[in-house]
C-alpha cells in the first residue's frame, strides 16, 4: 500500500482565507491536467490571519509534484 502525502501551502494575513480558497482551484486544475490518481484537495482557515490550501498525492508522485508546485511543507496523510 502506497503512502499518501499531504502537500501544504501556508497563507497569512487578512486575505489568507480567500487566497487559500483560490489556490485550491489551481490545485484542482493541476490534478486534471496531469491526470493524477488522487483528487483530494482543500483549504482550511486555522485562525483569522492564517489559512492553508492542500492536496494529497501518492508518495511515488510527491517529488515531481513538489518540484513543480513548490508547497511550503508536507506531512503523511491519514484518511
Image (cartoon, grey):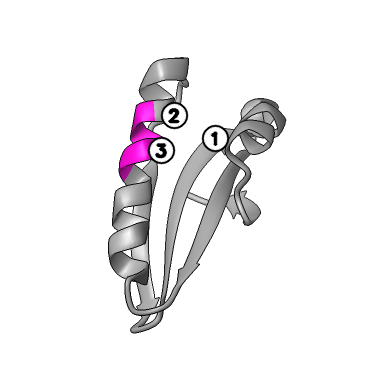
**Front-most of residues 42 and 78:** 42
Q: CA distance from mark 2 to mark 3?
A: 12 Å
Residue ID for mark 1: 57
Give the image location of residue 38, x and y in percent. Answer: 44, 29
**Which secondary structure, mark 2?**
loop
Question: Is the residue 26 above or below the residue 30 in the image?
Answer: below
Give the image location of residue 27, x and y in percent. Answer: 41, 38
Q: CA distance from mark 1 to mark 3?
A: 11 Å
Rendered residue at 57%/38% (across/down): 69
| Residues drawn in magenta | 25-29
Q: How many neighbours does mark 2 have within 10 angstroms: few (below 14), some (14-19), or many (20 or more)?
A: few
Q: Residue 40 appears in which quarter of the rendering? A: top left
Residue ID for mark 3: 27
Task: Examine the structure image and report whether residue 26 is included in the region drawn in magenta.
Answer: yes
**Which secondary structure, mark 1?**
strand
Residue ID for mark 2: 38
In which quadrant is the N terminus drawn? top right
> Do tag 1 and tag 3 residues touch (Cβ < 8 Å)?
no
Question: Is residue 72 visible in this depiction of the protein?
Answer: yes
Amino acid at each position: 500500500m502506497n503512502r499518501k502525502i499531504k502537500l501544504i501551502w501556508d497563507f497569512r494575513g487578512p486575505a489568507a482565507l480567500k487566497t487559500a480558497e483560490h489556490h485550491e482551484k489551481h490545485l484542482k486544475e493541476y490534478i486534471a491536467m496531469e491526470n493524477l490518481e488522487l483528487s483530494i484537495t482543500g483549504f482550511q482557515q486555522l485562525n483569522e490571519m492564517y489559512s492553508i490550501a492542500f492536496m494529497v498525492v501518492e508518495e511515488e508522485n510527491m517529488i515531481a509534484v513538489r518540484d513543480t508546485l513548490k508547497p511550503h511543507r508536507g506531512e503523511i496523510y491519514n484518511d
